[in-house]
Image (spheres, grey):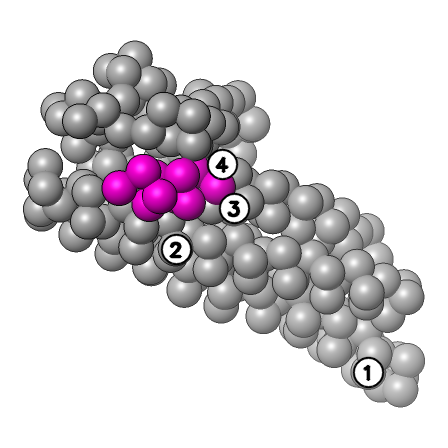
Amino acid sequence: MRKLERAAGVLFLLSTAAFLIGSGMLDPILHGADLLNGVVAKQKQIYAGVFLEVINAIAVVGIAMLLHPILKKHHEAFAYGYFASRVVESALLIVSLAGPLIILALSKQAPASGASGDASMHTLGNAAVEAHYLLFDLAMLVLSVGSLLFCTILYRSRLVPRLLSVVGWIGYTGLLASSSLSLVGVEAGNILYIPGAIFEIALPIWLIVKGFRS
């Protein structure tokens, strides 16, 4: 089991790093004042960002697969719930990446479309951006619900120190609130992400160094 735990810890860190770097590449482009202007010149940045986001999506499924044999010994229903949530999260994240690729495709066609097609291009571009972030918020909503089940298993089984499980509860409750508010058009700010970020760094380090308690 130690190999599974260490591998899961590594995938947690890989997922976090890939997401932070990938979204850091894509977000400035998707939030640009002139959405389609100059995007072609940044196509390598878009491809790199999309690639890293795909790595993140694959890693979260890998985490679920590695942890499932351990978690189901302590609460089978919650373990399957967590596994399913990570698969759905991964699928939503992958589909959301169509948004940046559509923006890139539209930016290549924009010069040839002329003035008459310019407005429609921007309308499609804005719709692609909105769809990208809508799917991301849905993915975070699913992640938060599934991870609350995960932290419940950790707390009840004492596989890790209960304080760490409580930090996870707080973090994913904050993520649930933030993603729910974002879906209705209310931006809660980044402060709700902090406890979850602490958990997703502390837990993998614990798994790599010490592993689950027997």
Q: CA distance from mark 2 to mark 3?
A: 10 Å
Could you tell me how far apart the alpha carbons at marks 4 and 2 are, in whole angstroms? 32 Å
Amino acid residing under circle 1: Gln
Sequence-wise first label, 4 or 3: 3
C-alpha distance separating marks 1 and 2: 38 Å
The label shown at residue 121 is: none
Q: Quadrant of residue 179?
A: top left
Question: Which secondary structure is most common in the magenta stretch?
Answer: helix
Residue holding disc 1: 109
Frontmost of labels 3 and 1 is 3
Left/right placement of residue 157 relative to residue 7 reads: left
Q: Which residue is found at the position 17% from the left and 32% from the top?
A: 153
Q: What amino acid is found at the position of numbered circle 2 in the picture? A: Gly
The residue pinned by badge 2 equals 62
Q: What are the residue bounds of the magenta stretch?
A: 1-10
Residue under the point 60% across and 48% down: 18
The 10 Å Cα crowd at callout 2, few under 14, some 14 to 19, many 20 or more, is many
